[in-house]
Image: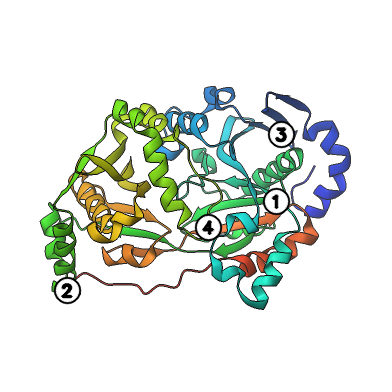
Amino acid sequence: MCFDSEQAILALSKNWFFQAGCGSTSIKSKKISYTFSAEGWKASYVSDFLEVAGSWPVAAENQMLSAPFLAAQAGSLPASLRPRFLVLEDGQGPAVWASLQVVSFNAAENIRETAVWEGTSGYLRKQVARLGNFKLLICGNLFSVGENGWMVRADLATDNAFFKVFTYFLKQAARCEGVQVLVFKDFAQELPALQATGFHPLSFQPNMVLPLDNAWKTADDYLEAMTSKYRVRARRAFRKADDLEFRELSLPEIEWNAHQLAELYQEVVLSSGFSLATAGADYFPGLKAALGSAYRVVGVYRAGELIAFYSTIHNGKRLEAHFIGFRQVCNKDCQLYLNMLYRMVSDGIRMRVSEIIFARTALEIKSSVGAVARPAHVYMAHISPVLNRFLPWAVRWLEPREVWTPRHPFHVD
């Protein structure tokens, strides 16, 4: 069986799908376990991480692909976001390990940016959006930005041939699950090998990253690197937060405040223009229990009341901004969001990381603290070759766009 032609796959799919595509299948209490095999390769596709934990690498350079993180996140994701895991094996044993997520997409519900639905074009978009829901199979983490989708065995790391095998099995799994669209996210570099398998490269909002200068030993060093305009702006924000208490929460405190953390987070989500899924109250204590000191939740208190929080994941030489939440009514008076960004910068300098990953949202304000835009390429494909031709057009037509002006807070040598 070859992997070189989508037409060959489709020609064989009707017969092969039922004989081998879902050859070993178990669906009990929504537990999914499929096995596939072809051309000397075997794939295990499961919903329960414990089924593949034995073959998962003991050490993962990327915290987001570590067994503790994946097990914890899988157990605390909302019902709308279903975890999946794929392990590919060749004659030498496990070769590719992938973290996947299945989520339903409904444009009318998931896109809240009002400009998308305004005017004549907005009316047409609404009509298209009513045509139905779509299920997405995402290789990567919907709750983070970065290459958090898979690991490859060292001898295959520079061999792009495995993409043909990888995407072939993913498409078979997608058909078993009734998924229409496959998504790979987020890559700093383009991947021609993935594009060669029928995936369309799409660039959405960039990833905002703050590289930390080795000369910054303290937060004051960071401020001194700014122009006077931005240094004054930062200190003004600090004064507005004089009556706020920033306190790292322990696991018992996170458990006690879990529902309030979820409410604060939801308040931010509802003000955004787009979301596919949101985390519930179980998410925060689940990650803390699994990751320990690598996962920090910092509560922001005013007069003893929790009004905001931010969370980060210490991931090797990177500090990754994770979920935040705050009372919108308090944000302007205290400049909550801006102060939380400055706090994350201070945390990163103290931890001696090389960069802070701020992710995709609120691009302009993140650039004002020094973050720069980096590409985060996304690749998408519809499992129908006919509909796949129109996929990039449909995505661009419905995509909300954030208009922003990059800021440059640092002295230029």
Q: Nearer the viewer, mark 1 or mark 3?
A: 1
Amino acid type at circle 1 is Phe
Q: Residue 373 in the image: x percent, y percent?
A: 38, 65
Amino acid type at circle 3 is Gly
What mark, if any, has residue 40 been given in the picture? 3
Q: Residue at 58% across / 64% down in the picture?
A: 202
Amino acid type at circle 2 is Lys
What mark, if any, has residue 274 been given in the picture? 4
**Residue annotated with mark 1:** 134
Left or right: 233 in relation to 311? left
Marks 1/2: CA–CA distance: 47 Å
Q: Residue 182 in the image: x percent, y percent?
A: 66, 50
Disc with the residue nearer the chain's start (2 vs 4): 2
- Residue most extreme to the bottom: 120
Q: Nearer the viewer, mark 2 or mark 4?
A: 4
Helix, strand or loop under label 4: loop
Disc with the residue nearer the chain's start (1 vs 2): 1
Q: Give the class, few, some or many, for how many residues have Cα within 10 Å of label 4's Cα (few <14, many ≥20).
A: some
Marks 2/4: CA–CA distance: 33 Å
**Residue annotated with mark 2:** 229
Q: Nearer the viewer, mark 3 or mark 2?
A: 2
Residue 297 seen in the figure: yes
Helix, strand or loop under label 1: strand
Helix, strand or loop under label 2: helix
Marks 3/2: CA–CA distance: 62 Å
